[in-house]
Amino acid sequence: MKVYVFNSPSNEGGAAIGNVAWDFLRSQYPARSDDDHMAFAISEAQRVGNIPPGADVMVLEKEDLPANWDYFNAWTPNFSGKAVEVDMEKARAIHMDKIRHVRAGEFAKEDVRFQIASDAKDALTLDAVRQRRTFLRDLPETFSLDGYTTVSALAAAWPPGLPLP
């Protein structure tokens, strides 16, 4: 199935993907070719403002898009190569945001443990909570994603000691 791709101002120039209502267009206009349906869909998207004026547009097979949609906001259209590529710097930032999100949940759990241990005057647990909180606080600085150059390697990277999302 084909899709159209264009630069999205709302995604800092990253990729935006447009789907075509193939079944509807084929049933309403059976004499038109799929290329005609695609051209119509793109012109309608431009007419109503879904595609910004002057934006480059290319048509790709959906299968040619990057496989991992978790990093969609890192997708960048390459119009000369007729491809959608992944900006690894943006992908690493997206992945670190996932780590920070899980880390925030862990901080909340440690806050509860701290309160219970504090009320019980449990020095051993308080020390363990402090160590865990230090580990969590330092994660963005101690777990580097800089060496990951492919989406599959990046997606598999996760700090030891932090639960998977």
Image (spheres, rainbow, N blue to C red):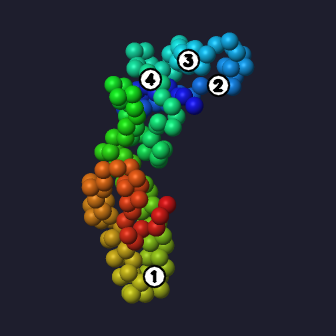
Amino acid marked by disc 4: Met
Q: Quadrant of residue 141?
A: bottom left
Residue closest to the eye, 123 or 151? 151
Using the image, tell me which numbered label, if any, was put on residue 35: 3
Structural distance between the alpha carbons of marks 3 and 4: 12 Å
- Residue matched to label 1: 117
- Where 36 falls versus 139 (above or below)? above
Residue 13, position as x, y percentages in the image: 37, 29
Location of residue 34 (image quadrant): top right
Q: CA distance from mark 4 to mark 2?
A: 17 Å
* Amino acid marked by disc 2: Trp
Crowd band around label 3 with a 10 angstrom C-alpha radius: few (<14), some (14–19), many (20+): few
Disc 4 or 2, which lies upstream in sequence?
A: 2
Q: Which of the 4 quarters of the picture holds residue 77?
A: top left
Q: Which residue is mark 4?
A: 58
Above or below, 83 relative to 35: below
Label for residue 22? Answer: 2
Q: CA distance from mark 2 to mark 3?
A: 11 Å
Residue 50 in the figure: left or right of residue 123: right
Q: Work out whether 104 lies above or below 131.
A: above
Label 1 secondary element? helix
Depth order, front residue of 44/113: 44
Q: Which of the two discs, 4 and 1, labels the residue nearer the N terminus?
A: 4
Q: Tell which circle, 3 or 4, labels the residue nearer the N-terminal end.
A: 3
> The residue tagged with tag 2: helix, strand or loop?
helix
Where's residue 20, x and y in %? Answer: 59, 25
